[in-house]
Image (cartoon, rainbow, N blue to C red):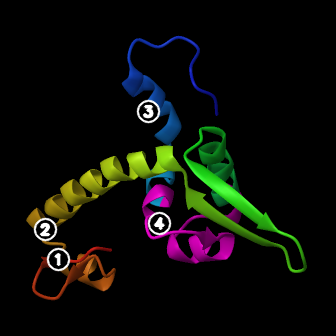
Amino acid sequence: MKIREKYTCPLEIVHDFMRGKWKAILVFQLRNGTQTFSELKHGIEGISEKMLLQQLKELQEFGIIGKNSYEGYPLHVEYYLTDRGTQLLEAVLIMQKIGVAYMLENGQQELLEQKGILKSGGIPTKK
């Protein structure tokens, strides 16, 4: 995926960075520090390995995430948020709050509790 060559505002660029189903979720998953490919795969329900690799590659190209590879066998790779990714995380956390509020308004508190996003009783966690 490429950033468009001509744009009329900076939001178009950020839209290009984050376009797709999984990118905001990946940024959110990396909020607490580095994670391996396997940790990311297990932490995101429904993403295929092929899609995860593609999304990680695009986020790297845009400077949102970084990757550390360690020599040896088996290969060990960790992904992390760059400074740009950390800035973007602030927007993702705001989007999550809006999503949580919408889900609560529509009677989905139990699902949020099951996923660990809310504690029982509706008190938001830092997750």
Start-end of magenta stretch: 26-51
Question: Dividing the picture into quarters, in which one does residue 107 lie?
Answer: bottom left
Label located before the other in sequence (1 or 2): 2
78 within the magenta span: no
Q: What is the three-letter code of the residue carrying label 4? A: Gln
Verify CB contact (< 8 Å) between mark 4 and mark 2: no
Residue that label 1 marks: 109
How far apart, in angstroms, are the residues tagged by discs 1 and 2? 5 Å
Query: Could you tell me the amino acid type at mark 1?
Result: Gln
The amino acid sitting under disc 2 is Leu
Report the residue marked by disc 2. Answer: 104
Q: Residues within 10 Å of mark 4 (few under 14, many from 20)?
A: many
Crowding around mark 1 (Cα neighbors within 10 Å: few <14, some 14 to 19, many 20+) is: some
Residue 32 x/y as whole percent = 45, 70
What residue does disc 3 label?
A: 15
Q: Residue at x 90, y 77 (%)?
A: 72
Residue 31 inside the magenta-drawn segment: yes
**Which badge, 4 or 1, comes first in the chain's sequence?**
4
Instruction: Residue 29: give its label.
Output: 4
